[in-house]
Image (cartoon, helix red, strand yellow):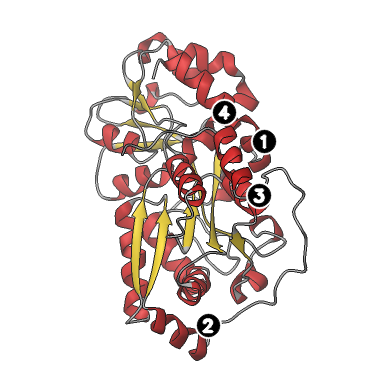
Amino acid sequence: MARRNLSRRDAIKGSAALGFSLFAAPVRAAAPEPVAITPQLIEAAKREGKVVLYSAMDLPVGEKLGNAFQAQFPGVEVQIERSGSERLFQRIAQEFSSSIHAADVITTADASHVISWKRNGWLAPFVPDDVAKYFPDQYRDGDGMSATSRIWLSSIACNSNLVKASEAPTSFADLLDIRWAGKMVKGHPAYSGTIMTATFQIVRELGWDYLERLAKQRVMQVQSSTDPPKKLALGERAIMADGNDYNVVLLKEAGQPVEPIYPAEGTPTISGATAIFASAPHPNAARLFQAWLHTRQTQQFFTDYTAQYSAHTQVTPKAGRRKISDIKLMKEDAAGVEKMTDEIKMRYARLFRV
């Protein structure tokens, strides 16, 4: 049977049917004590034999991460279910409303999802030792329900074979120039958490009028934030109106004719949160994965491999890559995204006719 798309309101109704309320005041308790990776935790995870990861990461990235985990902890398989964050949010709501609890760990590109799941009482508190020691407060939940596993940007970009450096846009405003009509590609906020978060920040800073004018530019619409960099590299479009910057950086490093551009108005910033479900069928494997994911070694490996950024204060940028501190950023606001999600989906669909 085909899944029906759920709005945030639908998800709230489903939660109420389970005896939860997304808007009930959460019961606050002291955050749990930090947990290190111990032989006991590893053995408990091996007895469970598997961790099921619902992931918004690119599948090759998730698989690389899963293979690294399995190499370090043989006997614990990583099963990855990959989709866009907004689709994962719908899937979780549908599964919970049907009393299906398949996921152990989830990593999302839309940090507002954690707010909903936490209010639902669906998350398990767990604080990895490295998160307690090396992650700034803004990158970890105060009750231990989640931690920021990765940070990236939704920049614009160009194909350097199709656009001269002297003529390349340098701002979001430049994308409204008639010369870029029919030459741009962008992701969709109803599918991608990256694009949902970026759209919120752009609307907050530039207004709906900006998107209304951009929609008149005959923009190619794709789903995931990983798709625009690929279209750019293939030469199918000259300009990326949004997407993710790390795929552009990786493609450029691989010799593709692409160039990331960080807009003068500021670049939308995305924090990817990871959390464990309280109903996890493999709770010890979930804790081991969460603890391992946030160690300095894993975060450094992930940063080097994916060209994303880490909140871990001991992780350093790979030589030759631009530091996030050198880029003008738009401010994140997960609570703001949560309030505007349904409005963004509705107005965006109307403007871009998708």
Vertical placement of residue 354 versus 300, above or below? above
Do the residues under discs 4 and 1 have CB atoms within 8 angstroms?
Answer: no
Vertical placement of residue 110 versus 312, above or below? above
Label 1 or label 2, whichever comes before in sequence order = 2
Vertical placement of residue 278 versus 309, above or below? below
Report the residue marked by disc 1.
336
Q: Is residue 69 left or right of residue 7?
A: left
Q: Amino acid at mark 1?
A: Gly
Label 2 or label 3, whichever comes before in sequence order = 3
Using the image as rendered, state which of residue 115 and residue 336 is in the foreground: 115
Q: Residues within 10 Å of mark 3 (few under 14, many from 20)?
A: some
Name the element at disc 3.
loop
Q: Residues within 10 Å of mark 1 (few under 14, many from 20)?
A: some
Q: Is residue 267 visible?
A: no
Q: Amino acid at mark 4?
A: Asp
Residue at x-position 31% and y-position 53%: 59
Marks 2, 4: nearer the viewer: 4
Q: Position of residue 229 (x, y in %)?
A: 33, 37
